[in-house]
Image (tube, rainbow, N blue to C red):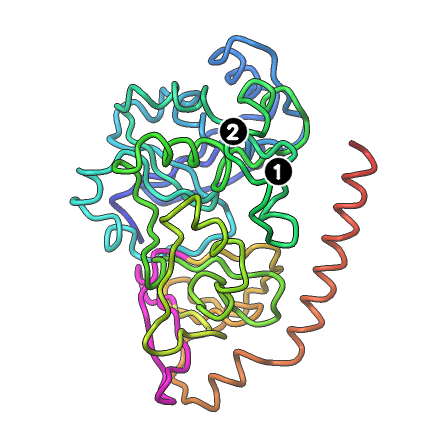
Amino acid sequence: MNSTIDFLICTDQKVDSNAANIKVFTTNLLEIKKRIEELVKFKVCLSSPRKLCDYKGLYGLIFQEYTKNYDFWGFCDSDLIFGNIRTFLTDDILNNYDHILGLGHFQLQRTSDTKYFDVIKQSHGMGKNPYWLNKFSIEGFVLDTGLDWKSVFTTEKNQVFDELPYGVAAKYYELYPNLFWSGHNENNRCFDDVDSRYCYFSDIYNTYSKYCDSGYLLLSKIFPLWKREKPSNPDLNAVIYRKKGKHLFRIGKGYNGKLIEQELLYVHFLHRKMKVKTNDYVSFLIVPNRFINDRKFNLFLFFFYAFRIEHKWNIYIAKLQHFLGRIKEKYYE
């Protein structure tokens, strides 16, 4: 399972790993805060795990004793299922790009890139810019109008400094577009970010009808990497996923009524409470909102798995919990 790529888990929890490519480093927020302050030379805010998002772009620098001997370092979320990373991040991409992918789920950065810390210092957080824009209006969205990097690190509120359309990735793309590989093209992107607003599994960018009513389309005026073309055949909309060894596939109904499998780099399950209903961790199906045993299925079973009604209640409950959590977070700011 991606055995040629090493993972480092920095945690204050007890985590056991028997995998040769997974290392566990025991630490805590206070120790990480000290590491950040030693790097940037000023006091920073880090009182909750959520604020770590703004510091993701520093991980390769503050954990340099672990990353210095690698060609690339990176970070990823813990709610991902990876496919075969090497299938997508080929030697050609690794040889020609310094900053790879631009969203907070998964990014890579060339270790020997001497200009990287200067990019960080020129980057801006969200500030007063609305996240994904207010009612998807491009008006008023201007790069570099958010908080500067020092202000991002000295405020408790998360500033989306780890991903487009803000932060280090946005500035890197602005300054060095030819060295930035986003994983997006005019037809699709190589991963799925499952939208939590839907009961079924659907990625906004990879579904053209949804893309046309999203911030991706409007922001493509600023970030051309997000410009899509209308496909000759409809995109897969509601999908399920199959993990088969080190490979990951998106499965959906094609325009001709037949099931189609498309290989992915990873899938991101944001705000999804998933249940594990299988003992096979090598090959399995991922349906809303559970992991189940792999099996052969036809179109009828596909619709059964993709649109089971019980999943709707789970999503509604999760949305309510998330909404109440945001109210609590706002109250204590």
Residue shown at the point (41%, 82%) measured from the top left: 253
Q: What residue occupies the far right of the structure in this picture?
A: 331
Badge 1 or badge 2: first in the primary sequence: 1
In the rendered image, residue 293 lying in the magenta stretch gets the answer no
Question: Which residue lies under the disc numbered 2?
Answer: 144
Q: Secondary structure at mark 2?
A: loop
Image coords of residue 298 (percent x, y): 41, 89
Q: Is residue 5 above or below residue 234?
A: above
User: Three-letter amino acid code at disc 2?
Assistant: Asp
User: Crowding at label 2, few (<14), some or many (≥20) Cα neighbours within 10 Å?
Assistant: some
User: Three-letter amino acid code at disc 1?
Assistant: Asn
Question: Which residue lies under the disc numbered 1?
Answer: 129
Q: Is residue 36 above or below residue 92?
A: above
Image coords of residue 118 (percent x, y): 38, 18
User: Over which residues does the magenta segment extend?
Assistant: 243-266
- Is 167 displayed left or right of 324 in the figure? left
Residue shown at the point (34%, 56%) measured from the top left: 265
Residue shown at the point (46%, 36%) measured from the top left: 9
Query: Residue 28: which quarter of the image?
Result: top right
Determine which of the numbered discs, if any, sits on residue 67 in the image: none
Image coords of residue 194 (percent x, y): 51, 61
Image coords of residue 307 (percent x, y): 57, 80
- Is 184 displayed left or right of 290 in the figure? left
Q: What residue occupies the far front of the structure in this picture?
A: 139
Closer to the camera in the image, 282 or 115: 115
Q: Secondary structure at mark 1?
A: loop
Closer to the camera in the image, 174 or 288: 174
Majority secondary structure of the magenta segment?
A: strand
User: Crowding at label 1, few (<14), some or many (≥20) Cα neighbours within 10 Å?
Assistant: some
Compute the Cα span from label 1 to label 2: 10 Å
Query: Residue 69: which quarter of the image?
Result: top left
